[in-house]
Amino acid sequence: MHVIVCIKQVPDTTNVRINPKTNTLMREGVESIINPFDEYALEEGLRLKDMTGAKVSVVTMGPPQAAVVLREAMARGADDAYLVSSRAFGGADTLATSYTLSMAIRKICGGRTPDLVLFGKQAIDGDTAQVGPGVSEFLDVPLVTYVKSLKADKSSYQVTSVMDDGEHVVTGSFPCVMTVLKEATTPRFAPLAGWRKAAKAEIAAFDEKALAADPIRIGLTGSPTKVVTIFPPPTKGGGEKVDARTDAAAGAQAIADFLQKKGLVKA
């Protein structure tokens, strides 16, 4: 059984910067972390390794510095890691990213489809939750989203999926793509021995040529979604304070007068 976990390096939420020319995230020189939701997907993959002996590969698309999160995943127990990196991939939206990752997954598997591909439910820098479903479409395999619990053997699975109308039990056979909720599990810590092993591990790197990717389907060129402008929300004013602790009637009247002034109530 081969499980591939797609993880993403995201900027620490306190250090997000935007390129004013391209309106894309500036990742170079910014302190980054593993996308927190991807940690739960990784743990589910490692649990399957513990239970079934599955092979767990991790892959990320990003600049060279993204290798840091791959080594952390290997320190926790992943068997191998792959970095999808090239300036040609820069500025990709979710469609171009999904295409590129699907090409990388097929490359990792020698042209075949892996048994299971895991994603966190979404990335904290984009919050679209679209890449997992997009990869499912490009790989032409079934998709199960918002997985709360996962039980599997080497050929089939049973999951609890959280939907708007409640929880659903879904069963099926591999291959499959899943997106995982934080309620599914608790990520493990990487032991010191794992860090030592990961520090020496080789990480394979793929560019667009290695993937034989269609140049019109990657990066900004392959991204139909365009960010026209980005601006901070307007600063909220301090408002008016009414202290009714000593005179409740006067406080109530002050609020009524304010609402009437704004045209929200009639006298």
Image: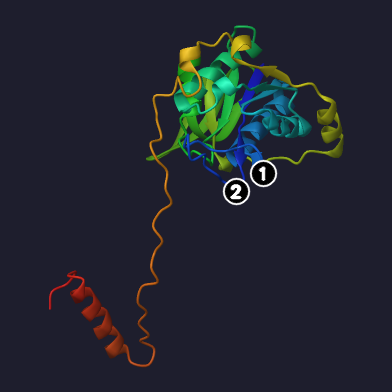
Indicate left or right for 123 with 34 as reference. left
Q: Kindly report the distance in space between the C-alpha atoms of the residues bearing marks 2 and 1.
A: 7 Å
Residue under label 2:
15
Residue under label 1:
31
User: Which quarter shows the N terminus?
Assistant: top right
Residue 248: x %, y % from top left: 32, 88
Inspect the image, locate mark 2, and give the three-letter code of the amino acid beneath it.
Answer: Asn
Q: Is residue 173 visible in the rendered structure shown here?
A: no
Q: Is residue 61 visible in the rendered structure shown here?
A: yes
| Crowd class of label 2 (few under 14; some 14 to 19; many from 20; radius 10 Å) | few
Q: Do tag 2 and tag 1 residues touch (Cβ < 8 Å)? A: yes
Dot 1 lies on which element? loop
Give me the residue at 42% from left, 43% from top: 230
Residue 53: x %, y % from top left: 74, 21
Q: Quadrant of residue 50?
A: top right
Inspect the image, locate mark 1, and give the three-letter code of the amino acid beneath it.
Answer: Glu
Indicate left or right for 3 with 230 as reference. right
